Image: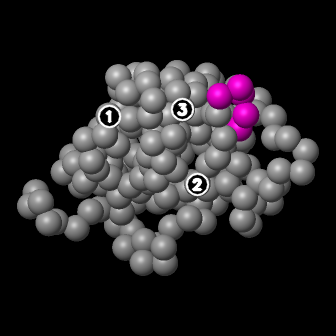
């Protein structure tokens, strides 16, 4: 496939609506949780996804409906900096149902003082669920943040059997409704 080829866009289903993913170069390049995709993504869905996009749709659907605890798909991290790719690869080592800290990520890439920078990478993670940024919490067990809102972080961890407590009065994120 040519490097400038357009990605194939597929849809996956969750109890909270449809999500979307983009595949190119034999790997997944982007995942949008339900409601986070730009309008042009919905318009670009390839009907009858097969191959890698078919696997993405199947595995993410199974994950969101509790039929599997994690996903195992090839990723395309080629558009990321070496630092960001290293942080995402370390995050992929966190087992389902467990959490680690931003400091753990920093230690894992050999940069113990880079916890804040690792947090910034997690905040821009283009592959939520596939790279489990929801499994990363603040030091001391605080929820930390989540780009899609803390309700999504809590939902994803609950699917894996981990109960995340949100402090009273914490805003769960824009538009999140239980």
* Colour scheme: one colour
Residue 173 visible in the displayed image: yes
* Quarter of the figure with the N terminus: bottom left
Closer mark to the observer between disc 3 and disc 2: 3
Instruction: Answer with the quarter of the image where residue 156 lies.
Output: top right
> What's the residue at 36%, 32% (across, down)?
89
State the mark number for residue 86: 1
> What's the residue at 73%, 49% (across, down)?
151
Q: Circle 2 — which element?
A: loop
Extreme-right residue of the structure: 168
Who comes first in sequence, dot 3 or dot 1?
Answer: 1
Left or right relative to 110: residue 176:
right
**Pointers 2 and 1 in contact (C-beta within 8 Å):** no
Classified by dominant secondary structure, the portion drawn in magenta counts as helix
Q: Which residues are magenta?
A: 139-143
**Pointers 3 and 2 in contact (C-beta within 8 Å):** no
Give above or below for 34 relative to 138. below
Who comes first in sequence, dot 2 or dot 1?
Answer: 1
Q: CA distance from mark 3 to mark 1?
A: 13 Å
* Residue receiving disc 3: 102
The residue nearer to you, when weighing 147 against 33, is 147
State the mark number for residue 147: 2
Where residue 74 appears, x then y in whole percent? Answer: 29, 38
Task: Check disc 3: other Cα within 10 Å, few if <14, some if 14-19, many if 20+.
Answer: many
Instruction: Answer with the quarter of the image where residue 108 lies.
Output: top left
Task: Check disc 1: other Cα within 10 Å, few if <14, some if 14-19, many if 20+.
Answer: some
> What's the residue at 39%, 68% (across, down)?
45
Q: CA distance from mark 3 to mark 2?
A: 15 Å
Residue 59 visible in the displayed image: no
Left or right relative to 69: residue 140:
right
């Amino acid at each position: 496939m040519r490097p400038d080829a357009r990605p194939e866009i597929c849809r996956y289903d969750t109890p909270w609506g449809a999500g979307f993913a983009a595949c190119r170069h034999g790997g997944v390049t982007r995942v949008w949780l339900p409601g986070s995709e730009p309008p042009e993504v919905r318009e670009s869905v390839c009907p009858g996804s097969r191959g890698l996009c078919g696997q993405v749709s199947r595995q993410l659907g199974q994950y969101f409906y509790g039929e599997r605890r994690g996903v195992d798909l090839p990723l395309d991290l080629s558009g990321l900096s070496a630092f960001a790719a290293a942080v995402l690869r370390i995050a992929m080592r966190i087992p389902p149902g467990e959490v680690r800290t931003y400091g753990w990520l920093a230690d894992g890439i050999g940069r113990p003082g880079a916890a804040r920078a690792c947090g910034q990478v997690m905040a821009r993670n283009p592959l939520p669920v596939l790279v489990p940024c929801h499994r990363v919490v603040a030091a001391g067990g605080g929820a930390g943040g989540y780009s899609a809102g803390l309700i999504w972080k809590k939902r994803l961890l609950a699917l894996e059997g981990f109960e995340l407590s949100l402090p009273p009065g914490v805003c769960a994120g824009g538009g999140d409704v239980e």
